[in-house]
Amino acid sequence: MSKDEVYFSEQLELAQLGKGSDHMDSTTGLAFAEYGLTKGFGVQIMEGYGIGDSKGKHGTYHQILGVDENGEDWADHKDPIRALDLVRVKLGYARKENLEMRYKFWMCL
């Protein structure tokens, strides 16, 4: 197992618990969400916060996956691929607006 696989495996265990994963930058967070999908997991909840100059400049749509429009929440569809697509959209919004964010994940089967 590579160093990343060991880290993601440990984070996947945490992401199934109440506290969630460790905080990750967007690149690591996306790779982690993609790793979870390979194990059959979907992102149920994602929370984010801005750091540095981005602190306080982000909107709820940047920071929380799990309080989205009807049909987009995990509870509405329980589809890991659809959840990953929404993660990509949220990370894309932050990147497009030049926000530096850290993210925490909760995943389930």
Image (cartoon, rainbow, N blue to C red):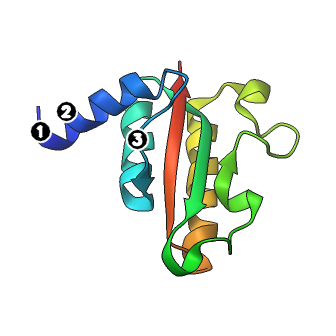
Q: Residue at x 67, y 71 (%)?
A: 56
* The label number, if any, that marks residue 2 in the structure image: 1
Q: Give, as a three-letter code, the residue at label 1.
A: Ser
Q: Quadrant of residue 43?
A: top right
Give the residue number, with chain letter if any, for mark 2.
6
How many angstroms separate mark 3 from mark 2 (CA)? 14 Å
Q: Position of residue 23 (x, y in %)?
A: 43, 48
Kindly report which numbered mark, 3 or 2, lies closer to the viewer in this rendering.
3
| Residue 17: numbered disc | none
- SS at mark 3? loop
Q: Position of residue 59 (x, y in %)?
A: 74, 65
Vertical side of 78 occupied by 68: above or below: below
Q: Earlier in the sequence, mark 1 or mark 3?
A: 1
Element at badge 2?
Answer: helix
Pointer 1 and pointer 3: residues touching (CB < 8 Å)? no
Query: Which residue is drawn at the image coordinates 36% and 37% (left, top)?
Result: 35
Quadrant of residue 14 in the image?
top left
Residue 108 rendering spot, x and y as whole percentages = 54, 22
Decide: marks 1, 2 in contact (CB < 8 A)? yes
The alpha-carbon separation of the residues under discs 1 and 2 comes to: 6 Å
Front residue of 84/7: it is: 7
Question: Which type of secondary structure does the marked residue at label 1 adopt?
Answer: loop
Decide which of tag 3 and tag 2 comes sooner along the chain: 2
Q: Is residue 4 left or right of residue 52?
A: left
Q: Amino acid at mark 2?
A: Val
Q: Mark 3 = which residue?
A: 22
Q: Is residue 42 above or below residue 98?
A: above
Amino acid carrying label 3: it is Asp
Quadrant of the image occupied by residue 9: top left
Left or right, residue 80 beside residue 21: right
